[in-house]
Amino acid sequence: MRKRRRQKAQAIKPTTTIRPFTLPPSPFNLISPSQVEQIHNASLKILAKTGVLFKEDTAVSLFKKAGAKTTGQKVFLEWELIEHCLRLAPAQYTLRARNPLNDVTIGGGSCAVMPGGGPPFVRGLDGVRRPGTLLDVQNIAKLSQLSPDVQVMARKAVEAQDVPVALRHLESWRAILTLTDKPGQSGFVNGRSEAEDVLQLLAVVFGGEAAIDGTPVAHCSINVNSPLLYDTAMLEGLLAFARYGQPILITPFVMAGVTGPTTLAGTLAQHNAEVLAGLCLVQLLRPGTPVLYGTATSNVDLRNGNPAIGSPESAQSIAICAQLARHYNLPCRGGGSLTDSPIVDAQSNYERMFTLLTSVLSGVHFLMHGLGILESYLTLSYAQFVLDLDLLGMVRQLVRPFPINEDTLALETIDAIGPGGHFLAAPHTMQHFREAHFFPQVGLRLPVEQWEANGSQDATQRATERCRELLASYEQPEMETAVADALENFIEDRRRKLP
């Protein structure tokens, strides 16, 4: 059976290339340069006076060796060391894919997109909320592979709750590495063992440990346990990946009023301090390792204690963190298509377009949770994933470079048509309309009579139907037989050894 599956995969055509966003040449700045300096200076005071707790002795030893003051596992940092480490971190880098056509630049003038990652629940094609499964991980991988608007894969688009926790990372990465040929991202809640397994899987696919040593092939996502604490599991993942020079995405999730001050200024000062502390650790371990300035910071609705990731404050945090990243000349991760709505409805779409548009206009280089997220990161929806492809397409059209030249000004065509004419059959129209206009895949532009004749489906129903069509059209990308065998052997060996 395994041999037949490989032969089928090898008969399939190469996949399409990716389409990262082109960012606006002048990103949106929500606060003034002097206000950026105020937040920066407040962060330095936090790092020098309050300190950051690192629950891993290797990390503390690296800070001690660099001359930082420590008390137990608490580290205090001065500007001189922070400034030195900032100079070492690159402003952009290329994330390699096993299909070179899908290599993606992180930083500079482009923005890459990743689908939702990590929710425990799914709203499937029937719209019912249920625990995530391995089949859902595989399906979201297939949908992501099919879409040029997705450039980076989530290791676990959802939690595969039908797979034992100890084996979940192996099965999820098997799906990402075999069903797609785009680069991926992981977080390591189970620490060193899980991170080292993934590094070995990547080495198998890319040609050995030497091939991934210093060549970015996957992100390592690190969440700070705010306030001001890096826990053991996250640090073990960070250290494992940073030793190989793999990009580290440092993302505090400060919830204003609960894990940070209720005021946005105080929350962002704390957030910034947490990012700078993690960046220093990465550079002390392996200078030059890429670090993304990440943000998932938002407020909590203090009427009920729930996170408010689709809030204006969430969008403000994204915009200001993008400014802080530019201040330090770092690539930035932020936002995505965020909402607190539990279902696909008006709220889910107006909130997500708000955070998505803010992220892109603010110059974010990497959008996490770009498709499918509902319910404050708790649920991923198939229908919303497809609707988000249209939202991404609209934003792409808004910010794409707008050519103004002799051809696009079309003066000869205007003169030839003249007053009272029409341009529908003009050669210029036929030549340009496909790239000049955005055409939604789910959104309708029909008379109501035709909509009724087609079954009067709402957007969620049409997105669900489109999702089924996409999954039916999926074709698996090629993988060399020797690599597929080595990958399978490694995973099966680890499955036997893990509890």
Image (cartoon, rainbow, N blue to C red):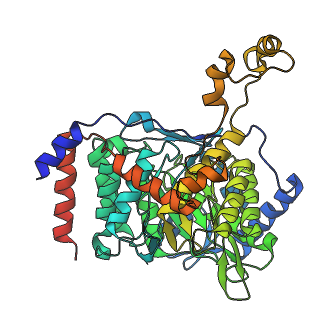
Q: Is residue 180 left or right of residue 27?
A: left
Relative vertical location of residue 488 with respect to residue 214 in this rendering, above or below = below
* Front-most of residues 307 and 192: 307
On the question of residue 26 being in view, the answer is yes
Q: In this view, does 202 lie to the left or right of 466?
A: left
Residue 462 screen position, x and y as percent: 52, 57
Residue drawn where x is 43% and y is 68% of the image = 124
* Front-most of residues 161 and 57: 161
Residue 205 screen position, x and y as percent: 29, 45
Residue drawn where x is 66% and y is 48% of the image = 447
Residue 497 screen position, x and y as percent: 18, 70
On the question of residue 443 being in view, the answer is no
Q: Quadrant of residue 58?
A: bottom left
Q: In this view, does 204 lie to the left or right of 264?
A: left
Q: Quadrant of residue 161?
A: bottom left
Residue drawn where x is 68% and y is 58% of the image = 353
Residue 235 screen position, x and y as percent: 47, 68
Looking at the rendered structure, the number of numbered marks drawn on it comes to 0
Q: Quadrant of the C terminus?
A: bottom left
Relative vertical location of residue 278 with respect to residue 473 in this rendering, above or below = below
